[in-house]
Each structure stands twice: as structure tokens, then as C-alpha cells.
Image (cartoon, rainbow, N blue to C red):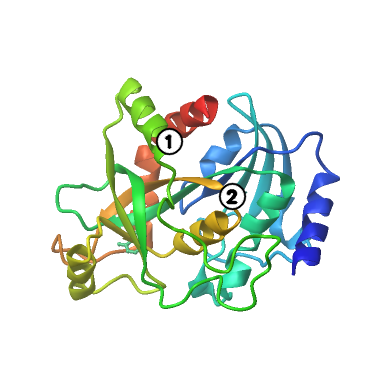
Amino acid sequence: MFEKLEKAAGFIEEKLNGRPEIGLILGSGLGVLADEIENPVKIPYQDIPEFPVSTVEGHAGQLVLGSLSGKKVVAMQGRFHFYEGYSMDKVTIPVRVMKLLGVGTLIVTNAAGGVNESFQAGDLMLITDHINNTGTNPLIGANDKRFGPRFPDMSEAYSRELQTVAKAIAGKLNIGLKEGVYVGNSGPTYETPAEVKLARVLGGDAVGMSTVPEVIVARHCSMKVLGISCITNMAAGILDQPLSHEEVIETTEKVKSSFLSLIKEIVKAI
Ligand code: HPA
């Protein structure tokens, strides 16, 4: 696997001048951030050796490399999800390729349902920690020490230092950044109201279908991680209305400008 992913990184490197230092994973409806990248080199996932191909609506499916706020970045415009049928190690291939490209800091974003009843649709939430509720783990299987240890520490999955930076910038920009624990489920069903209650009892503030595998793999290879959720809807059973992917995309449209300015300022500061 290591050698294969080195090949993928080499393929990408050939198209660049300069290595990226920050990686961005852009969630459902949040891919617009990649359009802000200057002098972009865009590489469709299907062109990259070893990369799976994403199929879900709202996920464009390409790597965009270039400059953002004066920093060299690599962004995933669209990500891979476990529910699409990819194994966890396929879902997380891009994170390892980013590591091999030289990325030391990963910013993960996602659309999530609000579990904390003080939240509302359109809020942005700084992820302080997560609960892996997918029932599996991307690191199951033989461990390759070149990426990281057999039993990785997860006591600071989301960098405290980066959280401090994000909070300071949100304050400066007057963005009411919420904070909380992200519960990662497998999807593709949205949760039942009982599952949302369970997530709350467990200490969760938001639920989603991504992020957790990528963050596990990023921490395994010692990347620093910052996570931001866009609360696109209140999770099932909180409001008396059904959930839909359309609502998720509509809300990301509404928060686009504050999301963009928050991430751009954070990239500038780190
Ligand atoms: N649940 C799971 N994933 C989601 C949700 C949700 O309510 N909203 C956006 N992604």
C-alpha cells in the first residue's frame, strides 16, 4: 500500500511547483472553498492512481492544488464516504497521499445534523472531539509503521492549538462559532430520533457520515487536525420535519460566505 500511495503522490507532484503544507477536505456543499484557490491545478480523482471515484450529488470529485491566503494547499473538492461502498482504507487514501505530499495540517469540514438543542441550522461548529460510531476503524489490518504506530494515541484528535486559533479568528470575524463533539455514523440513512437521543446521551453535539475515518488516519500519521462542521439541519426528531439532502445543500449555500472567510483566515494564521 505504501509504495502504491507513493506512486499516487508522485503523479500529483509532477503537476506542481511546490509542495502543499495544508490539506483541506471539503464536505457536502462546501466545495466552493476550492474555487478560491489561486493558480489552481485541478486533478479529477479518476485520473489519480489508487484513488476511488466519488458519486454523490454535491461532491465534485477532484483535488485542487494551489495557493489560499498565501499558503500552499491541497483541497479535496468532494470526499469518499464509507456508505458509498468503499472500504475504510479506500475512504482514507487521500489523507495518506496528502501526508506523502508533505501536508502537516489537515482541515476537515462536513455537513452535520445538530444534536445539541441549543444549535440551529446554519451554525458552524468547531469539532472538539469525536465518537467513532461507525462500528469499524480504518486502521484495522496490518499496520504499516511508515505511516504510524499500531496503537495510535487519540487523546488530542483535534489540535487544541488549532482550536484556539479558530476561536480567536471566529471572534475577530464576528462569527458565532459553536463547539462540540461530532458523532460519526456510517449512514447513508439519517438517524432515527432514538439514535439522535443516543448520540446526545453519549455526549455528542452533532452527527454526520464522514470525517471520523479521515481524522483517525490523519492522527495515525501525526498530522495536526482542525475540524469544522456546518450544522445544516437539526438532527431527526428535534424538529417535526423530515430530513433531506436538498435541505443540507440549501443551508451550506446560506452559510457559504462566513464559512469561506473563517477557513481562509484560519489558513492565513496557521
Ligand atoms: N445526520 C447525519 N449526517 C448529516 C446530517 C444528519 O442529520 N445532516 C447532514 N449530514
Q: Are marks 2 and 1 in contact (CB under 8 Å)?
A: no
- Mark 2 vs mark 1: in front: 1
- Label 2 element class: strand
Q: Quadrant of residue 261?
A: top left
Is the residue 99 above or below the residue 162 in the image?
below
Point out residue 183 in the picture as x, y percentages from the top left corner.
Answer: 33, 62
User: Which quarter of the rendered image does ligand 1 occupy?
Assistant: bottom left
Asked whether mark 2 and ligand 1 are closer than 8 Å, the reply comes as no
Q: 256 and 1: which one is in front?
A: 1
Circle 1 crowding by C-alpha within 10 Å: few under 14, some 14–19, many from 20: few
Point out residue 27 in the picture as x, y percentages from the top left corner.
Answer: 48, 52
In the image as oriented, which residue stretches furthest toward the right? Answer: 14
Please report the residue visible at 15 percent of the width from the left and 53 percent of the height from the top: 117
Point out residue 149 in the picture as x, y percentages from the top left corner.
Answer: 60, 63
Circle 2 crowding by C-alpha within 10 Å: few under 14, some 14–19, many from 20: many
Point out residue 216 in the picture as x, y percentages from the top left corner.
Answer: 50, 61
Is the residue 90 above or below the residue 97 in the image?
below
Please report the residue visible at 36 percent of the width from the left and 39 percent of the height from the top: 255
Q: Which residue is mark 1?
A: 161
Left/right of residue 208 with respect to residue 65 in the rendered view: left
Answer yes or no: is residue 256 visible. no
Is the residue 145 above or below the residue 18 in the image?
below
Left/right of residue 115 with respect to residue 257 in the rendered view: left
- Label 1 element class: helix
Please report the residue visible at 49 percent of the width from the left and 48 percent of the height from the top: 108
Amino acid carrying mark 2 in the image:
Gln
Amino acid carrying mark 1 in the image:
Glu
Q: 247 and 14: which one is in front?
A: 14
The N terminus: image quadrant: bottom right
Distance of label 2 from label 1 (alpha carbons): 26 Å
Q: Which residue is mark 2?
A: 77
Answer yes or no: is residue 106 visible. yes
